[in-house]
Image (spheres, rainbow, N blue to C red):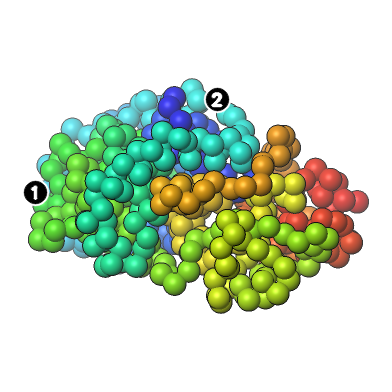
């Protein structure tokens, strides 16, 4: 499958690869916000996010399909969908729109079989970044930046989000709009909702799609997207479309399927309302001074400067603002100072590797150079089970208070860092390894 597809690059990774994940057949953005609870209220459904549910949710759903839904038939689905009518009615959907949409909907058997047909694989951070920040993608992004310079400037002025960031997300999510997916979104969402395991998430998305039809935002035939229910060039879920999609020219319903400017404006709008700070970069590569002690991970730029950190590109560090030290491959690889804007990108997709790739691709599109420090040639990956055990052991010792989910993000990194410091381990880089796991298990 082509590397240009975001989901095919194991988007479940959070910076450090530590999960055995599926290779998915379509691009889609994953977000980390409100889907942590069992079910949002019906009034909260349209306050959700872009394509944008955690990959582990889908993995669990698909595994439940084989056991619980193997014998499910289309009549069962029809009965199930009728139970969604009250929610649709509450959301303003007419009976006519509802009946027309659900008529003839059948279970998508290919969706049930698809995960089992895909091989599990692991991918290193260097490989992930290399795939996302390919020379071809950089070239295409730069070409579009020049071709759309005037409207991109307008989008940036309206949102405060750098145009290269929006372009980078468009490039990774749908190869700049050329790979949006052809699956029937209603059929996909109906099947996912029917699965039972956390199906309420997808039932709400199904209702949101009905609202789109009711409002005339999209025709039934155009309601197409990925096998995860994400739509269009930005790969938004229906609830994200209702909340964040915006028309560049104004007036008409936002067209995220064929209109590149609407798609870019919608991406920027999402980032804006997710907290993008126009005063800060997403992050930047830095050179650490000799004998750096790794004592702190979260300081102000001024404090980092006082400790001897310098921008790898030779420019001055920002004058002020919070910044975290991020070592995606440990002390042996490149070092970055990341800002809160890095976390905003992670709201589009919870993977640290994804957010880093977006930042680096955006830098290249804008003409800034690639990281100076080389990546390690070999990075040992922890399995999902190892990552969960790591989190469990860290929690038992009081270093970690997050979910035991096998996802090594910022909270897990800080916990590893605290453990390393407590044990006098150097470098205390927050990078989870077999050695760290073994020491925790003693």
Q: Is residue 343 left or right of residue 394?
A: left
Say which residue appears at 41% left-offset and 40% top-offset: 138
Q: Is residue 46 left or right of residue 200?
A: left
> Of label 1 and label 2, which has the lower sequence position?
1
Q: Is residue 67 above or below residue 142?
A: above
Query: Do residues under tags 1 and 2 come within 8 Å of each other at their CB atoms?
Result: no
The quarter of the displayed image where residue 150 is located: bottom left
Residue closest to the eye, 12 or 271: 271
Identify the mark at residue 96; answer none if there is no mark: 1
Say which residue appears at 11% left-offset and 52% top-offset: 216
Q: Is residue 361 above or below residue 274?
A: above
Image quadrant in which the N terminus is located: top left
Residue 188 in view in this figure: no
Residue 247 percent across, percent down from the top left: 18, 57
Q: Is residue 298 left or right of residue 172?
A: right
Element type where label 1 sits in the image: helix
Residue 14 percent across, percent down from the top left: 58, 49
Task: Give the spatial CA distance, label 1 vs label 2.
Answer: 42 Å
Identify the mark at residue 119; answer none if there is no mark: 2
């Amino acid at each position: 499958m082509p590397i240009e597809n975001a989901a095919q690059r194991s988007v479940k990774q959070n910076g450090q690869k530590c999960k055995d994940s599926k290779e998915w057949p379509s691009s889609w953005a994953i977000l980390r916000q409100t889907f942590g609870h069992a079910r949002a209220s019906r009034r909260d459904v349209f306050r959700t996010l872009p394509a944008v549910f955690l990959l582990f949710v889908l993995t669990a759903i698909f595994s439940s399909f084989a056991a619980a839904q193997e014998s499910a038939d289309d009549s069962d689905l029809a009965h199930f969908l009728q139970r969604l009518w009250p929610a649709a009615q509450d959301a303003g959907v007419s009976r006519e729109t509802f009946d027309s949409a659900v008529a003839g909907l059948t279970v998508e058997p290919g969706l049930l079989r698809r995960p089992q047909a895909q091989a599990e694989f692991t991918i290193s951070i260097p490989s992930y970044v290399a795939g996302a920040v390919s020379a071809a993608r950089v070239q295409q992004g730069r070409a579009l930046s020049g071709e759309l310079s005037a409207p991109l400037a307008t989008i940036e002025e309206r949102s405060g989000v750098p145009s290269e960031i929006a372009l980078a997300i468009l490039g990774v999510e749908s190869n700049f709009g050329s790979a949006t997916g052809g699956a029937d979104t209603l059929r996909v969402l109906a099947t996912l909702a029917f699965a039972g395991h956390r199906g309420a998430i997808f039932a709400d998305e199904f209702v949101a799609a009905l609202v789109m039809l009711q409002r005339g935002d999209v025709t039934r035939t155009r309601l197409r997207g990925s096998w995860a229910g994400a739509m269009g060039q930005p790969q938004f879920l229906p609830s994200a479309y209702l909340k964040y999609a915006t028309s560049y020219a104004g007036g008409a319903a936002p067209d995220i399927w064929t209109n590149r400017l609407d798609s870019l404006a919608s991406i920027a709008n999402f980032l804006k309302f997710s907290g993008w700070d126009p005063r800060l970069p997403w992050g930047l590569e830095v050179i650490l001074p000799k004998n750096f002690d790794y004592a702190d991970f979260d300081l102000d730029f001024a404090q980092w400067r006082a400790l001897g950190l310098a921008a790898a590109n030779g420019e001055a560090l920002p004058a002020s603002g919070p910044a975290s030290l991020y070592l995606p491959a440990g002390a042996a690889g490149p070092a970055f100072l990341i800002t809160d804007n890095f976390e905003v990108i992670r709201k589009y997709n919870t993977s640290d590797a994804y957010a880093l790739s977006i930042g680096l691709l955006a830098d290249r599109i804008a003409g800034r150079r690639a990281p100076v420090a080389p990546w390690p040639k070999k990075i040992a990956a922890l399995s999902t089970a190892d990552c969960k055990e790591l989190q469990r052991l860290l929690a038992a010792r009081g270093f970690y208070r997050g979910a035991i989910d096998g996802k090594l993000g910022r909270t897990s990194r800080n916990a590893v860092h605290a453990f390393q410091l407590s044990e006098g381990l150097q470098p205390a880089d927050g990078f989870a390894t077999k050695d760290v796991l073994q020491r925790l298990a003693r």
